[in-house]
Amino acid sequence: MDQELQDRFLNSQVINNYSQIYPSFSQALSLTQATGTTKSHIGHCDLCHGAVYRLSLDELLAFDPAAYAGALQSATPFTRRPSVHQYRLCHRSRPGGAEAYTGSYGSGTYDRSNGASTGQEGYSDDEDQFGYGLDDTGQKERYKYVLPKAADETIALAQDFNYDSSETWSGKFEWTDTVHKINIEVFKNPSFRPKQLEIINCILSGRDTFVVMPTGGGKSLCFQLPVVYDGMTGNNGVTIVVMPLVALIQDQMKRLNALGIPCHALVGELSWSDLQSIFGDISDGNCSACVLFVTPERITASKILFKAFQKLQKQGRLSRFILDEAHCVSVWGNEFRPDYKEMGLLKHEFPEVPVCAFTATATEEVIQDVSTQLRLRSPTIFKSSFNRPNLRYEVINKDKTAGKAIEQLIAVLTTRFAGECGIVYCLSCMEVEKVAEALSKHAKVAPYHAQMQMNMRNMYYKEWMSGNVDIMVATLAFGMGIDKSDVRFVIHFSIPKSIENYFQEAGRAGRDGNPACCIIFYLFHDSQRLLSLVERNTASNGDNHQTNRQKILSVLEYCESGFLCRRKVLLQYFGETLQQKCHVPCDSCSSDQPKRFLPRNCQKEALYICESILYSRKTSTKPGDFTLVTLHKVLLERPTQNHHLSGYLKRMEFSSEAAMLLLKYMIIYQLLIERVVSVTAKNFYSYYIRVNPQYRSYLHHMASLKFPIEPPIQSKRPIQEPQGAAKKARTSKLATKKTTVKEKPSLKPAKKAVKGSRSTM
């Protein structure tokens, strides 16, 4: 019995309380060897990555003689626990031989006695295959790929962008006829959408590619069609698709399976047999071309996956890497998917394999940042228009009382979107539950947030996708990967984290091309809730904290610009200029009266306000703390000697609305900062104003602020001439009023006051 045996699954269950009952059977099982030492039963499960108790074959047969004979499940003296699964058992040799077994993938064997691999190819230790290795102390540690810092010349390569040229990529290629045939016969599309053919030509040419295409533009076809082309031409290549969410991968798998395109996914807790099947399929050179979906965490933490990539490259079958939702590399790198920032390892380890990045939202800065992080080599950039002409953008001032705000939401849904399909985004899990409970009395509603069980989330998602539920009330993470064509509205009950997030989440509406609405319920102080989350999540990284803060404040600027075209403001953020009018007008453009604005240089006023607050805090024994409301009140009250700010904006002839808008501009452009203070045990918060120590660095933003000019009020009812005595009395009263006005001369020429739109706190 000195022969080494392979690990295998047996019929018996090995339970995690084995150590508690095993000593009572020690004599029956003859644990003590001839040398007087006791066998170690501590092992490591390569399925659950946890410590387990291991049995030798003779020990198991002492309890369950039928376990090795392929018999039915036999009873054992172990107690079953809820979280038990079937472990693999190690068959030890007798007597005292080295514990060794053959790896399941490849021909190499691993000898635990000296830690050396005895094979020439394949994979060494099973633990290595599952992302584990040994550290210097012999203890198990989690394998983690560490990406070396990019060299200066590598970064320089990424900066050499080649923006797409229609003449270059829309011409005739050797695969042109085949590509058109695949699009019609396999994908059932009569023709290509804008930019699709050019992107496919670039990918099939083997170039690094960066695609910015809005939701519903057809990004998936751009990497799915080349896979079919590889299979038809006998290439049998494997396309690796990296996606940040399991839900996205599952959705893609369903589509590809429906089209008959071979695909696999390395997600979740996979059994050993599943892994064997997947790696066996992709390593078989006789199989057709296929797609392998993975998450970024799987790539950075799995040695077996990297070795599989290396084997595919040696076979000439590693076609390309596709990174979907590539904006995660820059925008959500530290907060949402830290491992996404490490995807530069793909180009570092496989420099000759093309990398293609896809996203629906990316500014010029994000494109450059992502290209640098991924180490793309002279990438070709394709940018489609961000304009979604069928979407209507609105901002509704939200009541600061939570109950009344929910009543506002119910009124909008019941009067404008009764029976329609849509999404309501909330900021927190608790808010999701409250809103969903209130809406459930008026519509078919389901909640969706991270604190729910996964099976519940999947059930509600399927109910919503099938139409059994009309409204999904969810947190902001419910944005990516939703492909439902008949969404008629997307409502943000609290402001989104950034313009990029808003564009991504609002883009779920109207994918069928019919009109749809994207609405933000706006309360200025909702931003403080987001900012407080940013401070907690990025406290250790000052650069990311400042970047995320600026993105939140950009959303405030968008919401406050109600006198400008919402569509133009959004497109301008992404570097695009809209020449024509709104096809589906936004709330600003649909107004009966054209909205005008007056630019004004407010550097003098902003500087005076900041310095007066600082001076007051230095000289006053009781300086007091200003909130936005109290500061606004002081600036417009009658001048007194109590404070330098008293009546200042009133003297500068600002209206109440314009004064409030100026203060909000000063917060948006970070001259002033609001700090959140909890004042009661009931989680009631106050927002106090302080001056940013770097306020002079932001003063240039005050040079040209836009203030709305309200049109003159015109009565819609025709004025009827009074009759008889009433007419005579009316005429006499009007004459008296005119005389009174003329008798009160002005002391100085009146300046034109800056009027502002009403602002809701």
Image (spheres, rainbow, N blue to C red):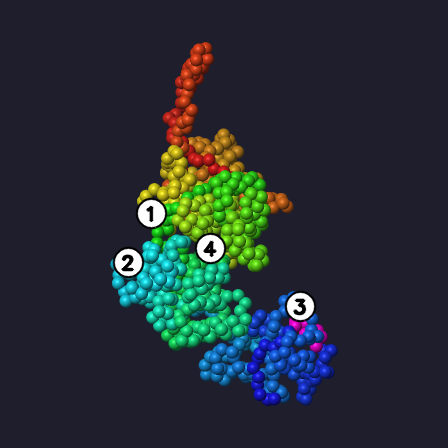
Numbered badge on residue 97:
none
Residue 753 is situated, as x and y percent measured from the top left of the image, at 40, 31
Residue 174 at x, y percent in the picture = 28, 67
Residue highlighted by disc 3: 81
Tell me the quarter of the image containing the N terminus.
Answer: bottom right
Mark 4 neighbour class, 10 Å CA radius: few under 14, some 14 to 19, many 20 or more:
some
Picture coordinates of residue 137 (x, y %)?
57, 76
Residue 577's mark? 1
* C-alpha gap between disc 2 and disc 1: 19 Å
Q: Which mark is residue 165?
A: 2
* Residue contact between numbered discs 2 and 3, judged by CB atoms under 8 Å: no
Horizontal placement of 667 versus 101: left or right?
Answer: left
Residue 456 left/right relative to 345: right
**Magenta span contains residue 21:** yes
Mark 3 lies on a secondary structure that is loop
Question: What is the chief secondary structure element of the magenta stretch?
Answer: helix
User: How many residues crowd around disc 3 within 10 Å: few (fewer than 14), some, or many (20 or more)?
Assistant: few
Say which amino acid is labelled 2.
Ser
Q: Is residue 688 above or below residue 383?
A: above
User: Is any part of residue 427 visible from this angle?
Assistant: no
The numbered mark at residue 482 is 4
Q: Secondary structure at mark 2?
A: loop
Q: Are marks 2 and 4 in contact (CB under 8 Å)?
A: no
The disc, 2 or 4, on the residue closer to the chain's N-terminal end is 2
Placement of 31 over or under 568, stated as above or below: below
- How many marks on residues? 4
CA gap between label 3 and label 1 equals 63 Å
Which mark lies nearer to you, 2 or 1?
A: 2
Secondary structure of the residue carrying numbered label 1: loop
